[in-house]
Structures are given as structure tokens and as C-alpha cells.
Amino acid sequence: MSLLEIELPDGTKKEVAPGTTPYDVAASIGEGLARQSIAARFNGRLVDVGRPLEESGSLSLITQNSPEALEIIRHSCAHLMAQAVKELYGDEVQVTIGPAIKDGFYYDFYSETKKFVPEDFPVIEKKMAELAKADLPVTREVMTRDDAIAMFRGMGESYKVELIEDLQEPTVSLYRQGNFVDLCRGPHVPRTGVHKAFKLTSLAGAYWRGDEHNAMLQRVYATAFLNKKDLNIHLERLEEARKRDHRKLGRELDLFSFSEDAGGGLVLWHPKGAMLRTIIEDFERKEHLKRGYDIVVGPQILKTELWKMSGHYENYRENMYFTEVDEQGYGIKPMNCLAHMLIYKSKPRSYRNLPVRYFELGTVHRHEKSGVLHGLLRVRGFTQDDAHIICRPDQIDEEVKGVMRFVQDVAAIFGFQYTMELSTRPEKSIGSDSDWEQATSALRSALEDSGQPYDINEGDGAFYGPKIDVKLKDALDREWQCATIQCDFTLPERFDLTYVGTDGEKHRPVMLHRVIVGSIERFIGVLIEHYAGSFPLWLSPVQAIVVNVTDNQADYAQHVYEQLRAAGIRVEVDLRNEKLGFKIREAQVAKIPYMLVIGDREMAEETVAPRYRDGKNLDSMKVDEFVDFVKSEAAAFK
């Protein structure tokens, strides 16, 4: 019998008999390593630690401290949760799929009778703990496709049957632990005893295979970690995220609301929320004008023929709304690029005129299914800080870098860290291969020249061009997709955009689609959670509130309020006949930066006594001194 040659990461080579497992190799090095090994990478493929080796190759062991370990543990824990649910509820529940996801995992279940509620979580977790304590072996089996279909059909697991029927392979892999078996490619941990720290977190509905015409499943979300310390840290972060939920804070701070009378995904901005939005929009206009953009405004609806010309009708119409006027079809715009191209075409352009940079705070509407709507983060009507840069091909590099600098500046102002990724051509797209290659190369070159680290996101570009996506990291280290830069050779071709070059001939420009914060609605939702509703002074819809101690100071308090308002301070006044402590607590709950307490002394000296929202008291000062103080502090944030 010829031996296999196995090469380890340090270059060491071992000769082993066929059928030797990665666990055996680990045990030959040390029992401690074997106990810590939960999977392996063999010739570049992830495999179970108990998988027999049948060929020579390179082997690296994945221990519980390896970067890949947590995803494998979470995927395996999804099976543990499914096993617990089946043992508790039996044939009443069917299992479907249960992948690992960022920060945890989920499993989708179907049942006509069992409706999961959060009160079920402790029961399921208790059963999971019992199964983990039993330290059941987790073993891989290979079965013919037909035998697997027959087995799952006999078990009443119709969703597993459907999954296998769609597979083309003659055999499938299954994983068994105790009396539970699941269809899976693996790898998985070797024993259920690996699972030490897990927690069920939430429930949601999900259509089978994401199709609204299919059955509604019950999705149980959960998470798992290597130890209880890491789990507790994560749960504390989840609790903090719940406290920061923009939907909760939006109600408490009276910023916005939704109404079924208006329709799902359509935001009603209350005065304070509208003020916050106005501050951001004014900031955007100022920053764009400073960087050489021209402000434009396009119509809300455009003829359907234009959307066909652009490719949106073919590639994007399921996300659009259409209407008819005088027997002419129109599409309500889901984006602003078409109007900007028509503005460009309104007169001849020379190479000397380029680049042109058109900026619009453009309100758009997109057809989002009700199941994906989520506060301000996913809505049907929203406003983008949308701009289109039309430039010569030789200007692409500098223009992309200029947008990247813009993004960096704005991220710093709002206190965000960020990462970047380059998204390439999707399967559903328009344009020639050469145009896509040129556009992708241009974005890649700008990223590399800037020295900015980036990842590649294969196949996730826009249908008309590749893009750079910027993901902001908030105070809880969560990522939010906001800014994007898209390089487009196709739409200028379709809309016959031209400029006259140095040779007197017409040439084709390139168009960069870009947003800096993206959807204003989404960005405000992110900001609310980032700041936990305690906005910096320059962003706060209300910067100060004047509160009197007794009715004796009411007239002076009103006078102070009017002085501050006239000076441009965003201010409120509370003259209610309530105790001072009550009014201060209400102002703190409203997260107003400054409370100006007016008592007899302040009235006599014509001063105000500022109190910060964290309880810190400032020295009394004249009203004009407070105005200068607020304006100076607000300017420092920008």
C-alpha cells in the first residue's frame, strides 16, 4: 500500500496511510491540538476533521482560534438548533435551511400549527444545551441522490426533498448527530460538545427561496461564540443596538413617523426631523458647491421610452412605478441620471467644458416589497445626494479620486470609519466587454493610486457599470452601505452624449454616477443609531431650550427665547407650571444639548445659566455670549 504525503503549513511533511483523517494527523502532533481542531483545509478545500484523506496534499488544521472557526461553529450550531426544534416539536415542524451569517446564524422552519414566539427561546436553548452536553458525534455520510430523496420524503421533510431534486450531482452529503440528519455540504464540528455559548435572538418571516409566491417560513435568528465571555459582549452590544434603534428614538425624539393611511415605506417628517434633514441638505449643498458641482433639478416622471433607452425598463422595471398621461407611458424615476444626461445634451459641449458635475438632492421612488421595509433604512420614497460627473476618459482617475476625498472628508465630519470594495460586472448587465474592462480598470487604478485598502465584490456592480462601494462603520462597529462611485461607458453611448475634442471631432464622454451619503433617509437612520440620538450641536434640531424656575421669570425667559431665535439659534422655550427638575429631565430625554435655566438671579443680571444634557453646569453668561459660544462650538464640529 502506497503512503500519502501530507505537507503541513510549516513545511513539515508526513507520510500517512490512505484513510488517515486530519484528526489523526493532529493527534500525531499532540493531543491538545487534536482536541482544539474542529475542521481542516486540505488542498485548499474546507473539510471535516474526521474526513478520510485519499490523496497527497497540503493540510492545515482549523482550531477554535482560527479565523474560519467561528463560521463553522455557527453553521454547526444551526444544525444543533434544528435538532432541538425537531426533538421538541417533531413532525409538527419541517426544517428547510440554516446558514451562518454575519454575527450568527438562522434556521428557517415551516409549520402549519406551531407559531414560534420569543417565549419559546429558553425552551429551545435548554434542549440545545442538553444535546451539546451529550457530546454527540457529528458524522458525514454520502448517499445517492435518489436514496436521499426517498429518506427525506419518508421523514415528511418536503423542503429537503425539493432541495435535493434541484441538485444535479448523483450523490449528496448528509450530516448526522444523534437521531437528527440534515442535508449539508459541511464542514461541521466533530462533536456537539464544541458548542459552549449560544443564544436565540429574534424571529422573522421569510418566503421559501425568497419568492413571495411560496410559503411563508418562520426564521429563528441566533448567534454562537467560542465562549460565554464573547457571547456576553455580543449580547451587550445587541442590547445597546436595541436602545439605539432609530425607529424607537425617532418616536421618542418626535423626528418622523409612518402611517398605513399614507402607505408603507413613505416617511412623514415631523418638524424636528424635517429640521435635521434640512441641516444635512444645506450642508450637502454647501459642500458640493465648494467642490465645483452645479445644482440641477430633474422631473419626477419621464417617458417610458427613455427608461427603455437607458436599459432600466429591461433590467430594473420590477423596482419601478409606472403611470400614463394622455395615453403616454411614464416611469416615476428610481434614480436621477436620465434627467442629468438630458441637461448635458441641451447644448453642444467642448473638451474645455469638461468635466461637468451635476448635483441634485433628487427624490426617487422604488418598488420595495413590504417584507423588506425597515424604518428609514429601507423605504419606498427617498432622496439621494445624487451627482453625475461627465468627463473625458483621461479625467476619470482624478475625478474618482476627488469623489473619494469627498467621501473621506464627510466621513470624518460625522465621525465614521469606513472600508471600500470594488464591485464587478453582474450577470444581468448591459454594455460591451471592452467598456466594462476599461471602467473596472479605471476604478481599480484610482483605488490603488490612493493607497486605500479595498476588497473585490465579484458580480455585484450596477447593471450599467462597475462601482466602488463605501461602507461606513458606526459607533457599534456595524457596517452601513452609503457612498458609491459607478463608472459608466454605456449610458453615454445609448444617449449619444458627445463633446468636441481638440481635433474638432465628436468624442464620447464617460459618466460617473456617485452619492456621498446616499439616501438621506437611510443616512439619518444611521446617524440616529450612531449618535444614539444625541446629535452634535451643529446637527441638533433643537440646540437649546429655555426653562424658567417659576412664573416670575416667564416674561424674561420668553425674551431670551426671542433673542436666541433672532440670532439663528435653534431654540425652544418651556414655560409650563411644572417643577424645574421635571422640565430638565424632559429636556434630557429629548437629548437637547443645552438647557438655559432662568431664575431670579438670571433675570436680575440679564444672564442665562447653561446646563449641558449630561448634567454639567456652565457659568452664567450674557445671552450674546451664549450665542457666540453655541456658534463657536457648532462650527468646531465642521
Image (cartoon, helix red, strand yellow):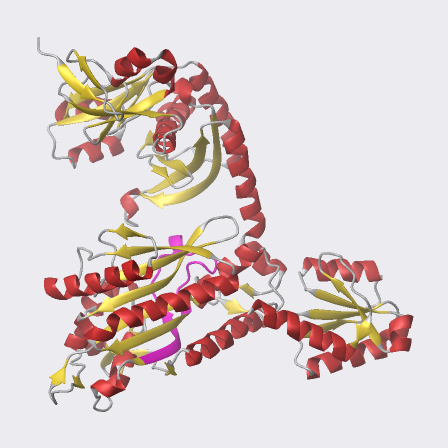
User: How many discs appear?
Assistant: 0
Q: Quadrant of the N terminus?
A: top left
Residue 43 lies, with reference to residue 464, above or below; the image says: above
**x 60%, y 72%: residue:** 635
In magenta, the rendered stretch is 357-383
Q: Quadrant of the C terminus?
A: bottom right
Residue 266 seen in the figure: no
| Residue 369 percent location from the top left of the image | 35, 57
Left or right of 287, for residue 620: right
| Residue 10 percent location from the top left of the image | 27, 25
Residue 259: in magenta span: no
Determine which quarter of the picture holds residue 496.
bottom left
Give the farthest residue toward the front.
11
Tell which of 241 and 414 is nearer to you: 414
Tell which of 109 and 70 is nearer to you: 70
Residue 580 seen in the figure: yes
Left or right of 1, for residue 153: right
| Residue 64 percent location from the top left of the image | 39, 26
Give the farthest residue toward the top.
1
| Residue 236 percent location from the top left of the image | 56, 39
Residue 594 lies, with reference to residue 223, above or below; the image says: below
Tell which of 89 and 310 is nearer to you: 310
Residue 366: in magenta span: yes
Tell which of 98 and 630 is nearer to you: 630
**x 22%, y 65%: residue:** 442
Left or right of 118, for residue 566: right
**x 23%, y 51%: residue:** 458
